[in-house]
Amino acid sequence: MAESEYKGMSMLKHVMSQMMPSPDAWGAYKDKPDTWFYLCHKRPGDFGLDLVTYGGRNPKYFPPSGSWEETFSKGLQWTFDMEEKTQGPDEDMRHLRDEVMTKVVPRLLRPLETEGMKIIPTLVHGNLWDGNASVDETGRLVIFDATPLYAHHEYEMAPWWASRHRMGRTYIDEYIKYPSRVSKPEEDFED
């Protein structure tokens, strides 16, 4: 198992170096020959990913940062910039953008990383909704069209809140059954 993990992670590291920890070694303990180890370095603990990804033909970029609020804010700002570049300037959209960036994002994300609170960056699919999930002929779950990034673990649920998607409240309710899934303050979870 240790050798397989090392070799598998080495292959993935070669293909997706920015997303994978560095596999260093595997082997047996000298004093306990039936006890094996696998050693790797964790990837840096930043949020985001230094890679432009695509949700369909829409580019997304969430630059690496040690703060989820900063990464998310810069990524959302980038999305607004792309929208304006594509659709042209719109005064209502600029007003909405300003309100979201100066009021909504800090109000909802800042409490997650203050007063001793900490978020651990989690590698997420980034575009997980019913159109990007299926089952193969054997019944095995298959997901595709990822726009991966290291994010707050609740980021993955964003598309599930939209009423047009079949991955909705039922999936959210299952997700939050597991301990520590809902970040404090819990009363802001649905926001």
Image: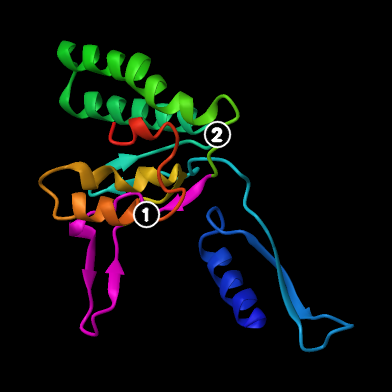
Q: Is residue 168 visible?
A: no
Q: Name the residue that disc number 2 marks.
A: 65
Q: Compared with residue 19, is residue 32 higher up or lower down, i.e. above or below?
A: below
Residue 117 found in image quarter: top right
167 part of magenta stretch: no
- Magenta segment: 121-145
Foreground residue, 50 or 66? 66
- Residue at 44 percent across and 47 percent down: it is 149
Q: Where in the figure is residue 128, as x and y percent of width and height?
A: 28, 54
Is 108 on the left or on the right of 190, as rendered?
right
Q: Amino acid at mark 2?
A: Ser
Give coordinates of residue 191: x percent, y percent.
Answer: 29, 31
Give the x, y percent position of residue 70: 48, 27
User: Which circle marks residue 125 in the picture?
Assistant: 1
Residue at x 29%, y 50% (from the top left corner): 127
> Position of 134 compared to 62: left or right?
left
Outermost residue, right side: 31
